[in-house]
Amino acid sequence: MPTKLIPLLAFVLTCGACAKPAVVPVPSDLIICANINRGYVIGSTIVTTNGLFRLDAAGVWRHFGYNDTTITAVAFDPRDHAVIYTAALNGLWRSLDGGDSWRLLNSWDLTEGLDVAVDPNAPDHVYLAHTAGVAVSTDRGDTLEHRNQGLPERGRYAKTIEVDRTTAGRVLVGCETGVYLTENAGRDWRRVLPATATVNDVQQSPHDPAHWIAATDGQGVWASHDRGLTWQRLVALADAHAYYNVAFDPTTPGRIVVGGWHPGVWTSEDGGKTWTDRNAGLPENPRAWRVGVHPQTGRLYASIVEESLYYSDDFGRTWQPDVLEGSLVNCFVSLPRAQR
């Protein structure tokens, strides 16, 4: 059954000016992860805090979990939000107590985690995308195995992974050579979107589970309306640009946003048929590393490389800098509620 989203958003960022951790967790609307600090000053010592953050009711970012600059993604168990998984450059981490303590789950032969996903219909199943393919756990990370049957020997670099929320064991992964699909929890894969450029992001619409979007590094943005079986290039967006990230607006059907190296931020309000440049109000020639949409308010976020995190309350028509100056966001993830 599909998961239900509550007004929480998780993303990975880098922050050099965030609030200190709260002693007691405060209810929040946003959760974040901080990874790469850009606030270097020659001859100065800068105190930074990286990892997971939560936005409290007063609008202050509160750190929780471990301090790590290499986190690339975060996922939560839909049955129990105290169970948290992070993908990091040294592999897969898990917390069973809401971030108070952590355990590295892999050995030396499985490192450089790039994305992590939990199957909402089989929550003990955890998928780690990494630089040598995909690793799968069927016991909440206690054991991991490589599941690369059908992925190419070369071009196995797995950048992004997304579980189809409608079907247990149905997963799409974006690699250097396209998008691959498994329908048996990674036991075998087949290519459904050929590409000669790295697929940076694959996302499923929160409104229509058959609608998927894939962002590539130099071959444009692609859409599928049959659960990822066939794909069509979105011709309204330039092909040559590097598109890093795509996000659907959970509050408004038809709204999609993409972010990239030269295009910056572009939005669509008709399901991807037409697109609008939304870079006015952002720094000049913005490199939008990550974009995301708040699942309750529809607030649009854009993390701009070497700048900051920006937000818009009118879907990109105007922008304001967030308080997280110098931050770099690596992912936005809606925190799921237990299944209905």
Image: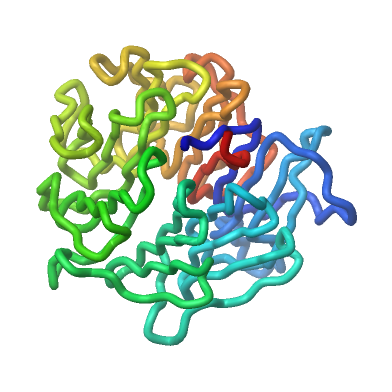
Q: Residue at x 54, y 59 (%)?
A: 36
Position above or below: 8 against 143: above
**Residue extending furthest toward the bottom:** 108
Q: Quadrant of the C terminus?
A: top right
The quadrant in which residue 260 appears is top left
Percent across and percent down for residue 141 are 51, 70
Q: Using residue 56 as the reference point, say whether residue 218 is left or right of it.
A: left
Colour setting: rainbow
Percent across and percent down for residue 33 are 60, 53
Position above or below: 298 against 69: above
The quadrant in which residue 157 appears is bottom left
Q: Residue at x 19, y 36 (%)?
A: 220
Percent across and percent down for residue 189 are 19, 59
Q: Nearer the viewer, residue 314 or 128?
A: 128
Q: Using residue 260 as the reference point, say whether residue 155 is left or right of it.
A: left
Percent across and percent down for residue 153 are 13, 72
Q: Which residue is drawn at 57% across and 28% down?
A: 295
Q: Residue at x 21, y 31 (%)?
A: 226
The quadrant in which residue 175 appears is bottom left
Q: Which of 268 and 81 is in front in this view?
A: 81
Q: Which of 85 and 278 is in front in this view?
A: 85
* Number of marks in picture: 0
